[in-house]
Image (cartoon, helix red, strand yellow):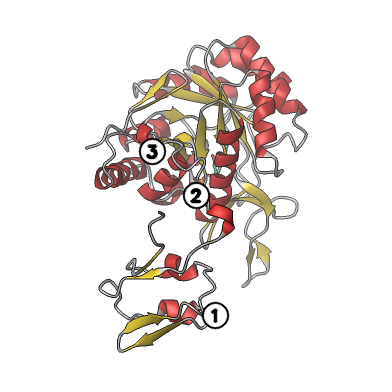
Amino acid sequence: MADLSVEVCGLKFRNPILPAAGPPVRDGAAMLACAEGGAGALVAKTISVRAAQPPEPNMAEIPHGMVNTELWSELPPEQWLEHEYALARTAGLPLIVSLGYTGEEVGELAPRVRPFADAVELSTHYIGEDPAPMVSAVRAAKQALDVPVFVKVSPHGHDMAGAARLAQDAGADGIAAINSFGPVLALDIETGMPRLGGQNGYGWLSGPALKPLAVRCVRDIARAVDLPVIGVGGITRGTDVVEFLMAGASAVQVCTAAILRGPSVFGRLAKELDTWLDAHGHASVTEVVGSALTRGWPDGRAPVPVLDLEACNGCGICETSCVYGAIHVVEDRIALDGEQCSRCGLCVTRCRRDALIWPTPA
Ligand SMILES: Cc1cc2nc3c(=O)[nH]c(=O)nc-3n(C[C@H](O)[C@H](O)[C@H](O)COP(=O)(O)O)c2cc1C
């Protein structure tokens, strides 16, 4: 069994898999369920100076993810301060308190949450693309607090590295990336109604569809700043956790999978991560962190894939999707025509039996 524990900004997590701000941590009792389900530490639902009034309906499952327009906590900050944070702390895990949104709002809330917070995370989701309000929120939090301040970035713009640098310059201790993507629109074609309520039915995309965007943002940020990064977006399996760690994340957060599969998902992901680390000869999570930060294809060129005939069962899915006509099933095994092969790589990712692989680099 590998050592799953990690230390981020001086906080010790028993494993690197945390809940992300959202419904699975909507109050103290829900956070205790996440702790019971195996989470490495706790992150609370974002609060702001007043309770949110989200439109209804505000959550819908779609293929490969969810759309939501849930806003921040519907509980008033007083309830969090009087009851929910104290209850969450009885879990005995580090507690990261999520605050939104402007410098003024964060400045008002930060001193009040200090007795409960081992760290805070600032949501920047509803303050637009201009980084100025994010910078002022970080400064307000740093002025009021002596615990680590994480900035959670939203993929509203392309320059995640730039946003992270500004957060670092303003004093942030770490970055969480990313929040949900959008605005997006999902329709019910039987009724023509938007899946979500609100003025125009817009929402935010989360879940597996978001993962490649999140991994890209995590690697961009990890390359740009000298701060720990917490990766968030589309994690459903232990191997997704590995991918984020390799991209430079020191820990990860999970929201959609915890909504759809319940709080026991944290323990299951930790177990899957452990299995992967063992199978690949890693004694700890930290051995993997950042291991893909500098990897890339030399000159953007790839070789022709290698075929393992023993592994091939001739199922033919590679033949169907080889748009270059380089693959043919012959007598229940595939034949690969290297002349026709464009080295696009699709077959390598489609084969369920690893019968098509890239040659080991020299
Ligand atoms: C229903 C819902 C509510 C959310 N509420 C918050 C929130 O209050 N604060 C926040 O920072 N992120 C919020 N998020 C974003 C998640 O924390 C997370 O960044 C995003 O969903 C991507 O991770 P996932 O694919 O694991 O869900 C919410 C996401 C969902 C689906």
Mark nearer the N terminus (2 vs 1): 2
Camera-side mark, 3 or 1: 1
* Badge 3 amino acid: Val
The kind of secondary structure element at disc 2 is: loop
Q: Position of residue 323 (x, y in %)?
A: 54, 79
The residue at the point 48 percent across, 65 percent down is 303
- Residue labelled with disc 1: 324
* Badge 1 amino acid: Tyr
Mark nearer the N terminus (2 vs 3): 2
- Residue labelled with disc 2: 234
- In 3D space, how far apart are the residues under numbered discs 2 and 3 (Cα atoms)? 19 Å
- Residue labelled with disc 3: 288
Q: Position of residue 21 (x, y in %)?
A: 52, 35
Q: Return the residue nearer the eye: 337 or 203.
A: 337
Relative to 356, 162 lies left or right: right
**Can I make out residue 206 in this image?**
no
Q: Is residue 99 above or below residue 74?
A: above
Determine whether the beta carbon of the residue marked 3 sits less than 8 angstroms from the nearest atom of ligand 1. no
**Can I make out residue 110 in this image?**
yes
Camera-side mark, 2 or 1: 1
The residue at the point 32 percent across, 40 percent down is 270
Q: Is residue 124 above or below residue 237?
A: above
Camera-side mark, 2 or 3: 3
Q: Quadrant of ligand 1?
A: top right
The kind of secondary structure element at disc 1 is: loop
Splitting the image into 4 quarters, where does residue 169 fall?
top right
Relative to 211, 332 lies left or right: left
Determine whether the beta carbon of the residue marked 2 sits less than 8 angstroms from the nearest atom of ligand 1. yes
Q: Few, some or many C-alpha atoms within 10 Å of disc 3 (few <14, some 14-19, many ≥20)?
A: many
* Badge 2 amino acid: Gly
Q: Position of residue 249 (x, y in %)?
A: 48, 36
Dot 2 and dot 1 residues touching (CB under 8 Å):
no
